[in-house]
Amino acid sequence: MTTSSTTRKQLEVVRDDQTPQKWCVLLREDVFRRFMSQGSPNPTIQKVFGGASFFSPLLFGKFFDPSDAFPLWEFESDILLSGLRSAGQNTIDWFQTDRDYVLKVELPGEGKNNIQVYAENGKVVEISGQWKQQQQGGESNSLKSTKDWRSGNWWEHGYVRRLELPQDADFKRIEASLTNDLLLEIKIHKINNKPLDYEANAKDNDAV
């Protein structure tokens, strides 16, 4: 009899991303539909950008470029994802508590190990990764090969979802973790809410 083990690792939340022209190419609906229908169906592309994926432009029922910041926590997940959940496709959840904003996402089957989380200017949290590595060109293509994939037609190499941070979110206190290389959890503490260990120490001091 074998028992499945759970591996959980903390991810670094990057706050200083100096990539020039990042996400400067917007993903239009007509471009996306051509990309999804080109040639024979690519199972990797379907996993990453299919309607149930967190990185799909069609996730919320109508087309929305995932490189454009979306005010996720202004909506209830039960309402925004009602169609997916009624179809048994429940791979995403978000909610808030008195202390935190929480996001839980089941990552697509490809590129999950290179997931990156950024906090941008205190206003946006960004989740991205690559599903296809850039090919290194020859000497004549050296400039092209060193260009960051996020600065061009990013969907040809990777995926992204950018989310607006609520006004009371503390962008300096964002935690990200990955369980079994599959389940991403992001916790964003609210401003003026002290960590639990801080309050525990305060109570101990009061009791002295």
Image: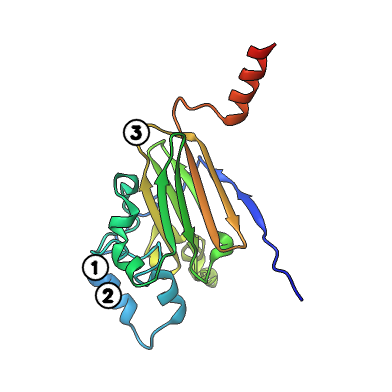
Q: Mark 3 or mark 2, which has the lower sequence index? A: 2
Mark 1: amino acid: Glu
CA–CA distance between discs 3 and 2? 34 Å
Q: Decide if residue 196 is on the left or right side of residue 154.
A: right
Where on the picture, by quarter, is residue 178? bottom right
Q: Nearer the viewer, residue 57 or 143?
A: 57
Q: Which residue is mark 3?
A: 167
Mark 2: amino acid: Arg
Q: The N terminus lies in which quarter of the figure?
A: bottom right
Write the residue at 60% across / 63% down. Answer: 181
Where on the picture, by quarter, is residue 58? bottom left
Q: Which residue is mark 2?
A: 33
Q: Are marks 2 and 1 in contact (CB under 8 Å)?
A: yes
Labelled disc at residue 29: 1
Element under disc 3: loop
Q: Decide if residue 115 is on the left or right side of residue 46.
A: right
CA–CA distance between discs 2 and 1? 6 Å
